[in-house]
Amino acid sequence: MENTPRHDWTRAEVKALFALPFNDLLFKAHSIHRASFDPNELQISTLCSIKTGACPEDCKYCAQSGHYNTGLEKEKLMAVEKVLEQAREAKANGATRFCMGAAWRSPPAKEMPALLAMVQGVKALGMESCITLGMLSPDQARQLADAGLDYYNHNLDTSPEYYGEIITTRTYQDRLETLQNVRDAGVKVCCGGILGMGESQDDHVGLLHQLATLKPHPESVPINMLMRIQGSPLENAEPVDPFQFVRTVAVARILMPQSRVRLAAGRENMHEEAQALAYFAGANSIFYGEKLLTTKNPSASRDVQLLQRLGMRPEVVEQSHDEAAEESALASALKKRADESAFYDAAVV
Ligand code: SAM
Ligand code: DTB
Ligand code: SF4
């Protein structure tokens, strides 16, 4: 029963979940998690920055805002074939979803044909496609939907009250309108936020309350830990307590029982124990590959080792016969390590 999505959560209910003792909260979240998902399975996405830097928005956390001197080299929109080359590589490494990100306030009309070709190309590889381009008009959302786009990423980032401390060049309402345009076009929604921007626990309550009262819930909910960017206004922000991060994942899992909750940016600076707790609390999706958009992610070999130690495996996505015949680098590396440890176990017995 607790796994039927609700959209009428009150802020007081969300606050009460955060106030539960840690073990009670994790037990509740994990029980809900198990009822909807295989708890040992992770959805694997790989990111690609298709247009980098010189963004007109002033998001205080971002390496790509043109308002701050973060030392990032700006690049114009990548060629379609270059993007598809990276998608093929991501697929061979084991990603089932390819996420393309552009540093724009909204996509320029003249770039739409190339963007649509990227979405079509990723789909033709048998991968799920996700893209994030800033604000979308209803017409742009429809064009992307017609090209076969599976997910659009557009984060609310924080609570409505704290938003103005972080971004002044657009409003919360602007974000909600794009989310609605994406929904109306029939594209699945990827929407989450960032922890560690100097906000309070009440802002974590406010963010999750907003996400959990969207109807339907976002199918994908990325929870990012701030990657502190030198030269950005948040370069010295206080790190978040890892237990508060895990709590936020657990509350997201309880509020949105059918959504994929992603342990998104920030794993590079997170202990493996905290990541394992987040998976127990209900996170079941990660970004895989050495780079996020402009910052570091754990190396593939570190992730293979961690997943193997935890007995976790990538989600299997329905594929055509030919595609299924090819095993991804991630699947075979996990299998190889499993064989090696079986050998080791046999040797020490
Ligand atoms: N420009 C588009 C937009 O803002 O919607 C798309 C790209 S933007 C980089 C995508 C998301 O990445 C942001 O909404 C934010 O939540 C997340 N993000 C950006 N910089 C980050 C950082 N330094 N640490 C953690 N998350 C970050
Ligand atoms: C999301 O929530 N996190 C991703 C993706 N959606 C687009 C981006 C993380 C960016 C981290 C900072 C960087 O690499 O520049
Ligand atoms: Fe631009 Fe997106 Fe970065 Fe904000 S988060 S500065 S909109 S790239």
Image (cartoon, grey):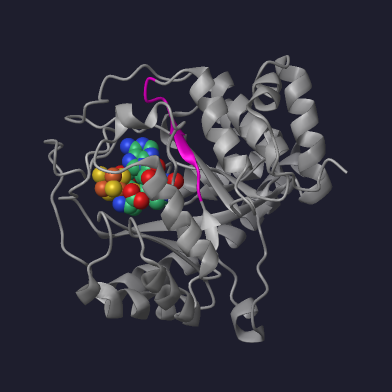
Q: What x and y, as percent, mark residue 96?
A: 55, 65
Q: Is residue 281 magenta?
A: no
Q: Is residue 193 magenta?
A: yes
Q: Most prominent secondary structure in the magenta stretch?
A: loop
Q: Residue at x 74, y 44 (%)?
A: 6
Q: What is the magenta range?
A: 191-198
Tell which of 274 and 179 is nearer to you.
179
Q: Give the residue furthest to the right.
A: 1
Tell which of 73 and 24 is nearer to you.
24
Q: Is residue 22 above or below residue 323?
A: above
Q: In which quarter of the view is residue 85 placed?
A: bottom left
Q: In which quarter of the view is residue 275 placed?
A: top right
Q: In which quarter of the view is residue 170 placed?
A: top left
Tell which of 239 and 251 is nearer to you.
251
Q: What x and y, as percent, mark residue 191?
A: 50, 48
Q: What x and y, as percent, mark residue 141?
A: 42, 69
Q: What x and y, as percent, mark residue 226?
A: 38, 31
Q: Residue at x 61, y 85 (%)?
A: 322
Q: Residue at x 77, y 35 (%)?
A: 30
Q: Is residue 72 above or below residue 167?
A: below
Q: Is residue 291 visible?
A: no
